[in-house]
Amino acid sequence: MKLENNIAIVTGASQGIGKGIALGLAEAGADVVVNYHRNMEGAETVANEIQALDRRAIVVQGDVSKRNDVDRMIRQILGAFGKIDILVNNAGLLVASPIENLREEDWDRVIEVNLKGVFLCCQAVGRYMIEKKSGGSIINVASISGHIPEINSGAYTPSKAGVIGLTRLLAVEWAKYGIRVNALSPGPVMTPLQREAYPTEELLEARNKAIPMNRHGTPEEMARVAIFLASDDSSYITGEDIKVDGGSQASMFHLVRQLAEKPFL
């Protein structure tokens, strides 16, 4: 198993992409720390599923945007497992709004969780890995929205662009310590929350037509990329941002072509 004897932390792992990554890492052999902020029931369900795979799992509550919470989480994890090999920064949120109407408190909260939370977790785990001279892999879940603007996404697009920039900075600064830092940028991924955004099959079909592969991705597909980045299979890769988006960024005129049903000139 690629990740046997590894201890992995996944933030925001109670549902969606975080859940998929946590289960994928466990299937690859890792023992997993399931972090959550409010959804304790979901986190415990994920931990039980990991244990059913004959891997160890603990549930750790904490708000990644709060330094005290992050420091407490690290102490709890080291107390339970004694080491940290892999960190997946997945926790995030989106408050939809056009910028002109975005409330300051919503801007602050999204930046705090999506960007500051990644910084705090990277710093805490990075300090541990540097002190122990253990090396390790850090994977920051960004978004294709960090590369191309997502209309009415409020602070989400700027926050994810910041995650990509932070990933590259840490990769350069920490390479000498054997710490690899990469980003994973999902495109549209079908999670329960995403499905709720398209209450009819017609709306879902219309959204799928805007994706060159004509479908949403799955959390399991995101997990497979995370496993690669966490494992020695990617031992010479750091500072990269891997887009897992069904070709969404590769063809900006795809939807126009679909609607016109003829080559775009």
Image (cartoon, rainbow, N blue to C red):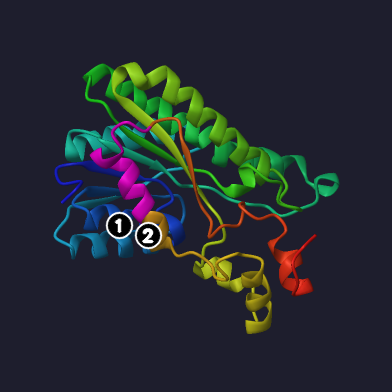
Q: Magenta part of the protein: which range?
A: 224-237
Question: Is residue 243 shown left or right of residue 76?
Answer: right
**Mark seen at residue 24:** 1
**Looking at the picture, which amino acid does disc 2 mark?**
Gly
**Mark seen at residue 5:** none
Label pair 2/1, CB-CB below 8 angstroms? yes
Q: Visible in this render: residue 153?
A: yes
Question: Is residue 73 shown left or right of residue 27?
Answer: right
Q: Compared with residue 126, is residue 240 higher up or lower down, i.e. above or below?
A: below
Label 1 neighbour load within 10 Å: few <14, some 14-19, many 20+: many
Q: Is 260 part of what is drawn in magenta?
A: no
**Looking at the picture, which amino acid does disc 1 mark?**
Gly
Q: Position of residue 223 (x, y in %)?
A: 36, 55
Q: Residue at x 57, y 67 (%)?
A: 194
**Mark seen at residue 20:** 2
Q: CA distance from mark 2 to mark 1?
A: 6 Å
Q: Position of residue 142 (x, y in %)?
A: 53, 44
Q: Residue at x 53, y 28 (%)?
A: 166
Q: Position of residue 134 (x, y in %)?
A: 22, 25
The residue closer to the viewer here, 187 or 49, is: 187
Q: Please identify the quadrant where the C terminus is shown.
A: bottom right
Q: Position of residue 229 (x, y in %)?
A: 34, 42
Q: Compared with residue 130, is residue 71 higher up or lower down, i.e. above or below?
A: below
Q: Visible in this render: residue 125?
A: no
